[in-house]
Image: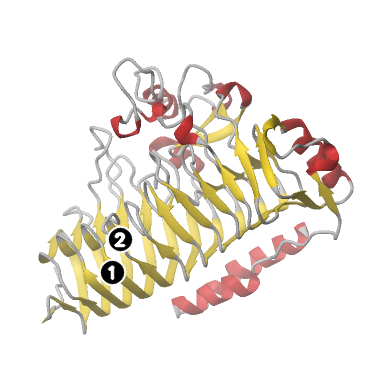
Amino acid sequence: MICCIVFMSCRLKTLETSIEDPWKKMDFVIKTMPQVNFLEKDYDVKDFGAVGDGVAFNTIAFEKAIKACTSNGGGRVIVSEGKYLTGPIHLENNVNLHLEDNAEILFSTNPKDYPIVHTSFEGTELMNYSPLIYAKNKTNVAITGRGILNGQASSGNWWLWSGAKDYGWKKGIPSQNDPTNREVLVDMAEKGVPVSERIFGEGRYLRPNFIEFFECNTVLIKDIKVINAPFWILHPIKSNNVIIDGVTVDSHGPNNDGCDPEYSQNIIIKNCVFNTGDDCIAIKSGRDADGRRVGIPSKNIIVQNCKMIDGHGGVVIGSEISAGVNNVFVENCVMDSPNLDRAIRIKTNSKRGGVIENVYVRNLEVGTVKECVLKLNMFYNVYGSQTGNFIPVIRNVSLENVKVKKAGKYGIWAEGYKESPVENITLKNVIIEKADSVYLLKNIRNFNFINTYINDKNVESVKN
C-alpha cells in the first residue's frame, strides 16, 4: 500500500502540470486517490468490556478492542446501540471505528482524562490535551456509521475556557486568553522553541480538537454525526488522501469550525452538512512562524455537494495560512442562513503572509448571507495587532454559475496591498439579487465580471 501511495503521488505531481483545465485537475485527484480497505473482521467493544449505559467508563475497553483489531491485521471496531462514556480514543493502522445506528459515544469533559500528545492549537504545534479521537502516523484508518460522536462540551469546562461571555465565561474564570496561555504558545513558536518543549495541558486552558488525523495517509470519515465539540471538529493535519463523506456537523460552540484541513493534500469533503459556531470549512496551513517553519501548503482540497447553514463562512481559507494554499475546488453546494456571514472567504494579514492561489468555485445556490458573497481580505484582524513583514498574495480566484438571493453589505469585498493587490479574480454567470452595495474593492488588479448582475445591474470589469 505504501509503495502504491508513493507511486500515485509521483504520478500526480507529473501529470497535474500538464492539465490546463482546473476542473480536470480536480477529476484527476479524485480518480487517483487511494481508498481505505479493511479485512472483514469485527471487534465489538462490548466483547472487551464496554457497557453502553452512558455511565460506565469505557476508555480501556475501546483501547483493547482497537489493539486487538490492529494486531490481527485490521477490520472494524464495532460500537453497537447504546451510549458509551469514554476518554479519548486513539486509532491504529487498518482500523475502522464503526458506529452502528443508535450508537452514541459520549466523551468525558474532565481534562484529567486526556493525556498530553503532539497536536496543534490554532495553527501552532504543541504538546497538549489529546484530541477526542486521535490518530498519529497511521495509514488506512476510518470512522464510519450513522452513530453520534458527542463531545458534551456545552456541559463541561471546554467552552468556558474560550473566554467568551456568550458561552458562560465570567471575570475570574481562567481561560485560554490569560497571559500565560495562548500568548505564550505563540511567543514560543516565534522564538523557535522545539515543539517537544511547548508543553501545555493542565493549567493552560487550551481546548483539544475533536477528530484529528495527524500525519496520516488514506483516511475515511463517513456518515457520522458530530455534536458539542470543544474546539475545531474535523482536523486532518499533515495528512494526505482523506475523504470526508456524508458527515453531519452540528455544533455551535466557540471556534467550532466544521472541518480544518491543515498542511494537508488531496482532501475530498462531500455530501456533508455543516451547522457551526465558526467557519463551516476552513482550510489552513499554520500560523505565522510555525507555518513558515513547517512550510507545507494545503493543496488539492475538493468540496462537493455540501450544505452550509450557520457559520462565519461557508468555505474559508485562513486565517492560519502562512505556508499557503492552492488548488481548491468547490462545486454544487448550498449555503443559506441569516447566521451565515459569507459564502466564500479568504482571510490573511501581514503576520500570516502566505500565497493563496487557484481557487475555483462553481454551481452554488446561496440564499442569505449576512455580510457578502465573496470576501478576499489581507487585513484580517481578530487578536489585536496583526501586522508584520510577510505581505500575503491572493490571486487566481474564479466563481462561476452562482445564484444569490441576499448578500448583506456587499456583493463582493476585496482588499489588498498596493505592493500586492488582490488579482486575477473572475466572476462569470453570477447573479446576486440583493446587496446593500455592489462591491468594496481596494488595491485590486484584473477583476473580471462576465455576465454578472448585482441588484439587477450588469457589473463591469475592473482592471486596477
Secondary element at image label 1: strand
Q: Camera-side residue: 394 or 123?
A: 123
Assign the N terminus to one quadrant of the image: bottom right
Amino acid type of disc 2? Ser
Of callouts 2 and 1, the N-terminal one: 2
What residue sits 75% from the left and 37% below the top? 51
**Would residue 55 appear left or right of 459 to someone viewing this image?**
right
Q: Mark 1 points at which residue?
A: 367
- Give percent across and percent down for residue 332: 42, 74
Please, is residue 49 above or below residue 410 in the view?
A: above
Q: How crowded is mark 1: few (under 14 residues within 10 Å), some or many (20 or more)?
A: many
What residue sits 51% from the left and 22% below the top? 200
* CB-based contact (under 8 Å), mark 2 and mark 1: yes
Residues under labels 2 and 1: Cα distance? 7 Å
Secondary element at image label 2: loop
What residue sits 69% from the left and 65% below the top? 34
Assign the C terminus to one quadrant of the image: bottom left
Specify the farthest residue to the front. Answer: 53
Q: Residues within 10 Å of mark 2 (few under 14, many from 20)?
A: some
What label does residue 204 carry, if any? none
Please, is residue 129 above or below residue 20 in the view?
A: above
What label does residue 337 carry, if any? 2
Specify the farthest residue to the right. Answer: 72
What residue sits 57% from the left and 47% below the top? 238
Specify the farthest residue to the bottom. Answer: 451
Q: Can residue 19 be seen in this view?
A: no
Amino acid type of disc 1? Gly
